[in-house]
Amino acid sequence: MRILTWNINGVRATKAPLKQVLDSLDADIVCLQETKVTRDQLDEASAIVEGYSSYFSFSRVRSGYSGVATYCKDGAMPMKAEEGLTGLLTNQKEADIIGYYGDQTMFTEEELRSLDKEGRAVITQHAICETNGKECLLAVINVYCPRADPEKEERKDFKLRFYRLLQARAQALLQAGSHVIVLGDVNTSHRPIDHCDPDDDIEYFSENPGRKWLDQFLFDPHQTEDSGGTLNPNNQSDASSGQLDTSLNSGIQNASEKEPTGGHFVDAFRFFHPTQRSAFTCWSTVTGARQTNYGTRIDYIFANRDFLNQFQDCTIMPEVEGSDHCPVRGELACTVVPAVKCPALCSKYMPEFAGKQQKLSVFFTRVKKGEVGEEKSSQDSVSTSQSSYDGHSESETCSQQSSSQLWESNSIKSEGSSVMSTTKQSQSRTSMKRTASDPAGRNVKKQKTDQGKQGTLLSFFGKKTKVETGDRRKANMSDIPKENPEADVKEDAVHDNAISNQSVNSSNTTVDSDDSKAKGSKDAENGKSTAETKPKQNQAAFWKTVLKGPPPPPPCKGHKEPCVLRTVKKQGPNFGKQFYVCARPQGHASNPEARCDHFQWVSRGKDKL
């Protein structure tokens, strides 16, 4: 069995499809932190992945914040799953709840709700078969512990309260007879070896409250009473030998006698790699510290001491990119016995992904069983009626027009004689138009749309020529009814003959003057272009002298390379100010390839650099 933890920094921000990402991690149980997705933002591509079952915990504080998710392969399907550590977020049946919450008397109900509402924990319970053939239970606690903001004192206390709640739940599951693995982003580097630069506060390094909690929560199998707190330099081969297992068992017994309430878990990575340095899992993306491996190890896999004999190795995977963290994977010799059915917390049972949500009206009205089918059939009938209406043949249209004309003629007969005469004249004019345009008597408006192409939107904004304007005017004039059509035809003929005569006479004169006009226009254009370019060049030169632009960045003192411009975003007296620093990535002071200590404020107004 392989189990993996990774702070993915946004489950929807992966460059590749999520299934491809999960398959590349090559683990049976994948625990992700900082998914940054709430229930309303969860899409089907993230909730339902082929070959996996997923279990989410969402932040109820704000969107795009916190959140964890556990993806289990179908061969490692859990028996039960639960959101949160307190049990206040569970709304499943009692048979689907893992339970065993430990001593919560030190917390008020309001504190418990505030600790769980940020979506920081998901627990899955699996049935496993150990190497000796014994079947037992394994609880996997996927956690994203809060970060202590140095400027917010209440967040420091919130972090320590979350640690205590996590410890109470983990020990309660242990006492219930289940093996426990706690893994995720703990947001605290335990020892100086887990920090890139602990020399700055080496005297107060161990005084950090989070590190003190890790000291009493974890048990170090390599530490002896006379070692003074140092690690035993055993390598991986020693850790897998029987000699170390014997010393480990004796150490566990001694520790259990001395510390009955703490030290029940072991850091799996340090168990196999106790002296490995520069083994970090988190780097600052702002300073580019990953290039120089200037980071911290704050992502862990903790296992209870009795379960360590099932571990074969625990490795860090810095080659996996896509986040400011890298995954940590543990390999175990035991196998998972998959459950027959997914637990109720599985995301595929959510109404929006289960196919139960038909339409919005379901949330406001009671829908009977037969109404959904009736509405669907009625919608189909409406759509077919619309399609049949749109597909009328020309004969049907003509029949409708003839019937309407018959109705009009009957109504006209009932009118007076004066109205009769006017209608006859109008009918005679319309009949003349129909015979001239369409002898079959089809609808003229429909014929225009059939013959003419539909104009584009740009035609309304383009410059219209005189010919198009004249044609449109003629078309509009033809639509106006005329009292004497024969006289109009004669007038049009005379007008056309006059225009043609004028065009013939003018064409003879324009042909002779075309060559001279072309030469004159070319000379005028050349003179105009040279006259226009001179003031433009003068203007550009003037504005260059006035607006010089930002000055070039100064070179750094250490590498003599151009610096980069930064802005102070921290609230305080220097908020908004700009400064120059070395452009290289952040690193240790002893690393010549890392950033030098160059710092320079940007001048404002008359201030000097």
Image (cartoon, rainbow, N blue to C red):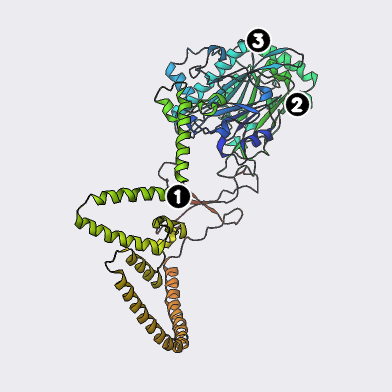
- The amino acid on which the numbered mark 2 sits, given as a three-letter code, is Asn
Q: Is residue 95 left or right of residue 372?
A: right
Indicate which label's residue lies in the foreground, 2 or 1: 1
Q: Is residue 450 left or right of residue 98?
A: left
Q: Considering depth in this image, is 587 or 518 the residue closer to the camera?
A: 518
What's the CA distance linking mark 2 and mark 3?
A: 25 Å
What's the CA distance linking mark 2 and mark 1?
A: 96 Å
**Residue 492: % across, % down:** 34, 75
Indicate which label's residue lies in the foreground, 3 or 1: 1
Residue drawn where x is 55% and y is 28% of the image:
68
* Disc 3 + disc 1, Cβ < 8 Å: no
Query: Considering the image in quadrants, where does the N terminus appear?
Result: top right
Q: Is residue 280 visible?
A: no
Kind of element beneath mark 2? loop
Disc marking residue 395:
1
Establish if 479 lies above or below 583. below
Residue that badge 3 annotates: 257
| Chain-order first, disc 2 or disc 1 | 2
Residue drawn where x is 60% and y is 47% of the image:
585
| Chain-order first, disc 3 or disc 1 | 3
Kind of element beneath mark 3? helix
Label 2: few (<14), some (14–19) or many (≥20) C-alpha neighbours in 10 Å: some
Kind of element beneath mark 1? helix
**Residue 397: % across, % down:** 42, 49
Name the quadrant containing residue 9: top right
